[in-house]
Image: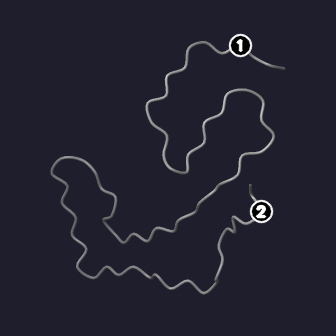
Amino acid sequence: MPGIVGVVQILQIGSSGVFNIGDIYKVTPYSNAKTFAGAGSFNTGDYVAVNNPYSATNTYDADAIDEPIAFTL
């Protein structure tokens, strides 16, 4: 059932972001990325102190394809 949408303000959409209003069948990604982060990564805030003297991030990936984006258009 369709709905009525009022005023919409879009400030920013990322390079692979999706914006949709209304009925939709399928949304598929056009890009993918893999992020490796060790202990103490992605910390935000004031006065963050992280002590990880023996931390190591394993970046070995045995498989060649994680999420294929072929045929998603």
Q: Residue at x 73, y 26 (%)?
A: 22
Q: Which amino acid type corresponds to the residue marked 1 in the rendered image? A: Ile
Residue at screen point 39% across, 79% down: 57
Which quadrant of the structure image shows residue 30? bottom right
| Image quarter of the C terminus | bottom right
Q: Residue at x 65, y 54 (%)?
A: 29
Numbered label attached to residue 71: 2
14 and 40: which is toward the camera:
14
- Badge 1 marks a residue whose secondary structure is loop
From what the image shows, is residue 54 above or below residue 22?
below
Q: Amino acid at mark 2?
A: Phe
- Residue furthest left as drawn: 47
In which image quadrant can residue 4 be found?
Answer: top right
Identify the residue shown where x is 39% and y is 69%.
37
* Secondary element type, mark 2: loop
Image coords of residue 54 (percent x, y): 27, 82
In the rendering, at what x and y percent does residue 47 appear? 15, 51
Q: Which residue is mark 1?
A: 4
Comes first in the chain, label 2 or label 1:
1
Image-based side of 4 in relation to 8, left or right: right
| 40 vs 69, nearest the viewer | 69
Residue 72, quarter of picture? bottom right
